[in-house]
Amino acid sequence: MLIGLVRDSVMQCFCHSCRAPVLPAAHRRSAPKKPVGKPRTKQPKKVKFITTEIRCQEMSKGGLAYEVILAEPVGVPVPRRADSPEKTPSVEEIQEKLKAAEERRRSLEASKMAAIAQKMAKIEEASRIRSEQTNNFIVATKEALDAKMETHEEKREAYINELRSRLKDHLEGVEKTRLTLEQQTAEVYKAIEDKMTTAADKRDENLKKMIERLREHEEQVRKVRAGNQEKFQQLESAIQEKLQQAADRRLLIEAEQREKLRNHNIKLAEVRSAATAKVEEITKDIENKLTTAELNREKEIQKKLDFVKKEERRAELVRQNKSARTETAAPPSSG
């Protein structure tokens, strides 16, 4: 727009040979050539007007017939439109136009900077939303892990309590068996004492048999107790081993979750650095373009101003030459 204003102002400057303003290229092509020699006065053109008379006659239903009668030509003078003098722009007007163009450029730059600020605000908003999503993901992951660990602990405690209840029931059964055996043994001792009173002859033999049976029974009870003790120890070792495995598995899961969180934080930092670098690159590119446009505009304005000054000097020379010729051609005054 600034270049167009300067071009229009330059085209209005004086030409080399006269004070008439220079027309643009499109108008110069269509302008008639000036006659060489003595100028002639322009005669008004004769304009012929033909008046007509129209008669209408209805020939049939729904139809019309027209009859056109041409009248004699009558000459009517056409008023000539006075040419409006073209105004030559001054240096102050050119300066005002340049100032207006400078203000428009500044407003355009301000709008561009506002657009850049809006884009930066959008990028910051996206980064904030991303951070919030990351924090929500970390909190949700931690809550899920805690809930999972609590569920695992509850299941482990329930399993241990179940094993303990089973072992307690088994020990209670063994104790009941022992009490039953002791009761039976007491009954047997009582029966032996009763029989000893009645059967003295078979007492020794029966005592030996009963003592042997008691020994076998005690041996069986000892074996049962030893087997139960071994089973109890095996169950206790199995429980300890499972508890250790659960603790190791929990530590492994926690390490995996920490590694995932660390990788996620690294990726987030990379994305943030890439976005910052992109914004800096766009800002530098815009600043370089604005600087280049400013330099080009100043050069173009300087060229146009030099051209305008040169044209003014030429016009001044033309006026001086014309005044000198007028003074030379003037007749000398009578003394």
Image (cartoon, rainbow, N blue to C red):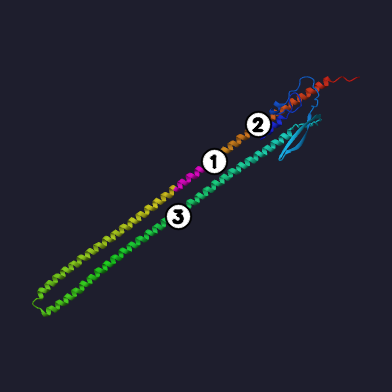
Tag 2's secondary structure?
A: helix
Please provide percent x and percent y for residue 313: 74, 26
Say if mark 1 contacts mark 3, CB within 8 Å: no
Work out which quarter of the rendered image holds the C terminus and state it.
Answer: top right
Residue extent of the magenta highlight = 264-276
Q: In terms of sequence position, does the residue under pointer 1 or pointer 2 come before the other?
A: 1
Q: Amino acid at mark 1?
A: Glu
**Badge 3: how crowded within 10 Å, few (<14), some, or many (20+)?**
few
Q: Which residue is mark 1?
A: 280
> As rendered, which of 285 and 233 lies closer to the eye?
285
Residue 22 against residue 189 in the figure, above or below: above
Element type at marker 1?
helix
Quadrant in the picture for the N terminus: top right
Q: Residues within 10 Å of mark 1 (few under 14, many from 20)?
A: few
The image shows residue 34 at horizontal and vertical percentages of 75, 23
> Is 296 colored magenta in this rendering?
no
Q: Name the residue at 71% across, 32% down.
A: 9
Q: Secondary structure at mark 3?
A: helix
Q: Nearer the viewer, residue 16 or 224?
A: 16
Q: Residue at x 22, y 64 (%)?
A: 226
Give the prevailing secondary structure in the magenta stretch: helix
Disc 3 and disc 2 in contact, CB within 8 angstroms: no
Residue occupied by mark 3: 140
Task: Name the residue rendered at 67%, 35% in the picture.
Answer: 2
Q: Mark 3 or mark 2: name the one nearer the start of the chain.
A: 3
Mark 3 to mark 2 CA distance (whole Å): 63 Å
Amino acid carrying mark 2 in the image: Glu
Q: Nearer the viewer, residue 254 or 317?
A: 317
Given contact means CB atoms under 8 Å apart, are the residues at marks 1 and 2 in contact? no
Image position, residue 165 (x, y; %): 30, 66
Instruction: Judge from the rendering whether residue 208 lies leftward or rightward of residue 135; answer left or right.
Output: left
Q: Which mark is residue 300?
A: 2
